[in-house]
Image: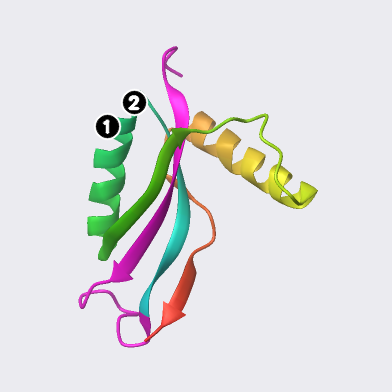
Amino acid sequence: MTKNNSVYWAGIEYLYTKDHPQYPELEGGFVYVFLYTEDASTFFHKIQSFFLDEKLEIIKIEFINVYDKKMKWEKPDDTKRYKKIYKEAELTGEIVLDDFYAYKR
């Protein structure tokens, strides 16, 4: 782990591109994305590249913030879930995604 890095997270709305295998059924959706990185700009560029590779188009970024691992969610199970995702992102240095909430065409 690099000393100055943090786990950043974002809420991202996306569309399925015509090249995505689920394009005929699904229009778009929302997902939380986590990544251990040096700053918000690097986070943005890595996430943008990842979504392009996955044949998804980002249409709106709700926020990009450093994740506060002390944050309490309304449901204790959600607090545990996001702490687990946080730890995975911190340990692996990889992009970690929460569940995709997709909507149909």
For label 2, count other residues whose C-alpha is less than 10 Å away and answer few (under 14), some (14-19) or many (20+): some
Please tell me whether mark 2 sits on a helix, a strand or a loop: loop
Q: Is residue 11 magenta?
A: yes
Q: What kind of element bears circle 1?
A: helix
Label 1 environment density (alpha carbons within 10 Å; few <14, some 14–19, many ≥20) = few
Identify the residue shown where x is 30% and y is 78%: 21
Q: Tell me residue 13's x, y (percent).
A: 38, 61
**x and y, in percent, of residue 12 in the image:** 39, 55
Left or right relative to 19: residue 7: right
Is 92 within the magenta? no
For residue 41, the mark is 1
In this rendering, is residue 22 above or below 76? below
- Quarter of the image for residue 36 reads top left
Point 46% across, 58% down: residue: 31
Residue 39 as seen in the image, left or right of residue 92: left
Q: Outermost residue toward the right?
A: 76
Identity of the residue drawn at 24% across and 40% down: 45
* Label placed on residue 71: none
> What is the CA distance from the residue labelled 2 to the residue labelled 1?
6 Å
Provide the residue designation for mark 2.
39
Q: Is residue 52 left or right of residue 28?
A: left
Q: Is residue 76 above or below residue 53?
A: above
Residues marked 2 and 1 touching at CB (< 8 Å): yes
Range of magenta residues: 1-26
Which quadrant would the C terminus be assigned to in this image? bottom left
Q: Nearest the camera: 1 or 43? A: 43
What type is the residue that disc 1 sits on?
A: Ser
Q: What amino acid does circle 2 point to?
A: Asp
Name the residue located 33 percent from the left edge and 36 percent from the top edge.
43
Q: How is the image coloured?
A: rainbow
Q: Quadrant of the rendered structure where residue 70 is?
A: top right
